[in-house]
Image (cartoon, coloured by chain):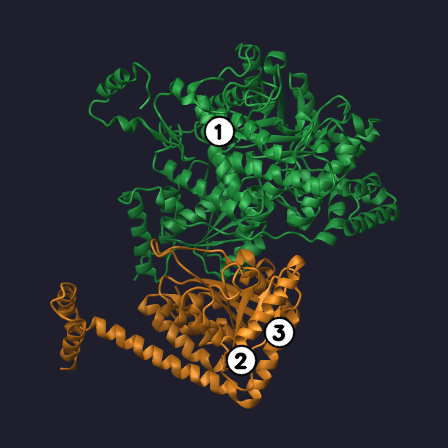
Amino acid sequence: MQKDPDYYIQGVLDANRLMLSRTITLVESSLPAHQELAATIIERLLPHSGNSVRLGITGVPGAGKSTFIDSFGTLLTELGHRVAVLAIDPSSSRSGGSVLGDKTRMIQLAASEKAFIRPSPTGGTLGGVARKTRESMLVCEAAGFDVIIIETVGVGQSETAVASMVDFFLVLMIAGAGDELQGIKKGILEVADAIVINKADGDNVQRAELARRQYETALHLLTPDNPLWSPPVLTCSALEASGLLDIWQTVTKHRRIMTDSGDLTRRRARQSVDWLHHLLSEGLRSWFYNHPAVRDYLPNLLRDVEKQSLSPAAAASMLLQKIYR
Amino acid sequence: MPHHPDYQKWEALATKLMKGKPFSSLQWQTPEGISIKPLYTAEDLEGLDNVNSLPGLPPYVRGPVATMYAGRPWTIRQYAGFSTARESNEFYRKALAAGQKGLSVAFDLATHRGYDSDHPRVTGDVGKAGVAIDSVEDMKILFDEIPLDQMSVSMTMNGAVIPILASYIVAAEEQGVSHEKLTGTIQNDILKEYLTRNTFIYPPGPSMRIVADIIGFCSKNMPRYNTISISGYHMMEAGANSVLQVAFTMADGLEYVRTALRAGMNIDEFAPRLSFFFGIGMNFFMDIAMLRAARFLWHRLLQQFEPKDPRSSILRTHCQTSGWSLTQQDPYNNIIRTTLEALTSVLGGTQSLHTNSFDEAIGLPTDFSARIARNTQIIIQEESEICHVIDPLGGSYYVESLTNSIINEAQKIIDEVESLGGMAKAIESGMPKMRIEESAARKQARIDQGLDVIVGVNKYQLKDEKIDFEIREVPASVRDEQVDRLRRIRGTRDQAAVDRALAELTKAAEDGGNLLAAALPAIRARATVGEVSDAMEKVFGRFVSTTRCISGAYASEFQATSETLAQLRGRTEAFLQGNGRRPRMLVTKMGQDGHDRGIKVIASAYADLGFDIDIGPLFQTPQEAAKMAIENDVHVVGASSLTAGHKTLVPALVEELKKQGGEDILVVAGGIIPPVDYDYLYERGVKAVFGPGTSVIDSANRTLDLIEKHLGPTA
């Protein structure tokens, strides 16, 4: 293992695929030494980052996310872009291990020299994923990728974490899965910059169109986040590679509007501030639970609360008092 | 409680012999979920509707033919094919002279997937797991001096079924044999390819149309030809238990029947020409009962289509002994396994049979091993006096009861498939594949714990394995020879005529004309297998499968207190603590080999043991696999090969890793790799080879050893 940050920094700036990959490994590592090294590298790569379209993609299981990214990403490479895909895969909670099969569904894109695909296990903690993905994104930007796609599973809280680090959040849906709004939380629609109904092919075209109108109605009921942008609902077929250019044009149009109005800069600035808050609360939490006083007293308090001889509020207050002193 | 007058006496006696162990411990729960008692009595037959029928009559439990083997024994039909058409032809002629009755052709994977031998994606596959056929010229050599009006020929072809069947028909034409005289079977069972073996070319929709076109063409022009062989064999080999095998095979059959009906055919026009193909494993009575249950089920299921011709609902089947049950360790044991499986097939009432050669877990069959395999059947037919009595197990309390259990369990799964809208829809949902893979992972977990015994593998192992027999090798020159012949054909044919015929075929693909009929002129004009496939691909596209992987099934077969499991999970956890991440491995299959049971079991089991596993897409090139390994920054790549591509593809992967800067990524290999090739692979940088029968626990431990040694001491 190389310990010299320059080794990685130079490699990433030279767009060396192996170095990019190894740097992400450092970013993802749970070892403090690796994290320190990664922090140094990120700090130095920061001036070279930020020049990409950051695109978050989520969707219900079965919506065809990977097939979509395969076709969509391939289109982007054909348009001359360099595309990095960061895919977040859930780990098994019991063994901690995971099967990361995403590339099997992005065959075309995976073989392209203009693409880099990296699936990452969640390792069971979503907070950790958010940090790792955000930093991996910066590394990919420094390596010259100008479109970064972050794919998340359509369940759990990872979507909102991803929405808070991208410029454009795309929610992928399909028609004909029974209740059209089933399985998708209102919260996700609220952060969506566009909804795309996939699998508009074969005898499914009409149903997709119907679903598109239903989502449009549903979105009308929400107040848009930004008065300049009401999230559109589009249809596409990743299988037949149709409707994809429209989606990309929507993304670029959004970017133009947001750049011109200064909203993009503000959005990223707000994300940085949110991120700072997030890091602070994470740090506080970790500091708190590792504090000797907490370690000493917490087990007893837990027992008392469990026995109902002490109220949770009283227990919390007692413990916090100990720290304040 | 059974009311046999002596039952209680028997139970008391038996309990005494149990010396304190509970009587209920004699019950056995099969992997199919069927509970087996230690004793069956007349009462177990009460109310069963599979009992007391006669052979040749509905519901055909006792056999599809009234006289069965008493009239004529089953057909000895050995599946074979390797390297070139010339070599395979010589092998066939020798086999026929030595008592074999029918031919069964194995094609190489390049042919299966519709690629000519000079295609860049198939360099490791040509002539490896079967014969390479690029054009009708190869087909003519394959059947040289074998009169196709007399010889029944079975062809295992599903993907490139149009050019291959057309080449066979044209080869016969050029022997002077007209279409209606042809007898034999084309496998043409594309549905199971999406489930298990992955030798498809087009998406399911167009593929089903091809099936319908072949049924349509043959029912008019080749009345003695079996247009489809609905196959459970590959499901069993992929890990399906006997209930899953029979259920999914029946469900596939229903889908084909509906496809033909939708294409406007009458049930009695084609249903009598449907045949089946089952795999027979080591669970002796289970698979006898499975064959009997299959005939019952098919008859019952077909009634909804109201056939007038009784032959429409008779299930006729070919059987093959299980290749998966063969071991590389102590390989002569395989002769015994195959003998038992052959007996299972016979007692189950098969119409034809292939017996495997004992060396097939090590390499391709030799003349010697093929002779033993063939003689296994001849000895049962001609020495054992088994053939005189029809369905000798009919009425057996146990076998009839088991037959009934399989019928009921399978029907439940068939109903489940039907409720999803039939097998094509079920396959889209991923359900059947997941079931099979779960069954495979559980089986592996039982073997790894020694609960399922495999002699020589997890019990009674030999200290020193010595191979004292010849191993057949495919010479590397096969590809050169094929490429040469392709060049000659392309140089001498009337190119304009070929182009015209191919354009007509593409048009038929667009307009819905019969594809087999449209392919014949192209093949006559010497268009190649690859060109004919491409002409249709222009319209249909090439199918890309999605890989899903189950999790938890392997670990759940272990006791919660299992130390083995805890030990390995402890190791991966410690690895995480020391290295900041879990051991990460890419499993890949390179070349056209779609047999993915091995990598699926490995992926699922290793993840259960605490690895992070990346699965590469099927049909990767070494270059693509190396790129993926580097982007995912894995510690190790596991390359699986079951079809003899290991000597080209695995060293090519090592080279590619070097070229792309990932020389510190380890490479291990697994699958059917002859031990004599291990050194060849080690010399080319492969760190470990895991042959068939390696326990997952074992390979995981050794892989971890390799990674840890390579990384050195952690901070």
**Disc 1 target residue:** B281
What amino acid is at disc 3? Trp
Q: Secondary structure at mark 3?
A: helix
Mark 2, chain letter?
Answer: A
Quadrant for the C terminus of chain B in the image: bottom left
**Do the residues at discs 3 and 1 belong to one chain?**
no
Q: Quadrant of residue A92?
A: bottom left
Q: Residues within 10 Å of mark 3 (few under 14, many from 20)?
A: some
Colour seen for chain A: orange
What amino acid is at disc 2? Asn
Give the mark nearer the N terminus: 3 vs 2.
Answer: 2
In the rendering, at what x and y percent does residue B392 appear? 51, 15
Among the chains pictured, the one given green colouring is B
Q: Nearer the viewer, mark 2 or mark 1?
A: 1
**Disc 3 target residue:** A248
In the rendering, at what x and y percent does residue A195 appear? 56, 71
Q: Nearer the viewer, mark 3 or mark 2?
A: 3
**Disc 2 target residue:** A51
Q: Quadrant of residue B487?
A: top right
Establish if B155 lies above or below B553: above
Q: Secondary structure at mark 2?
A: loop
Q: Secondary structure at mark 1?
A: loop
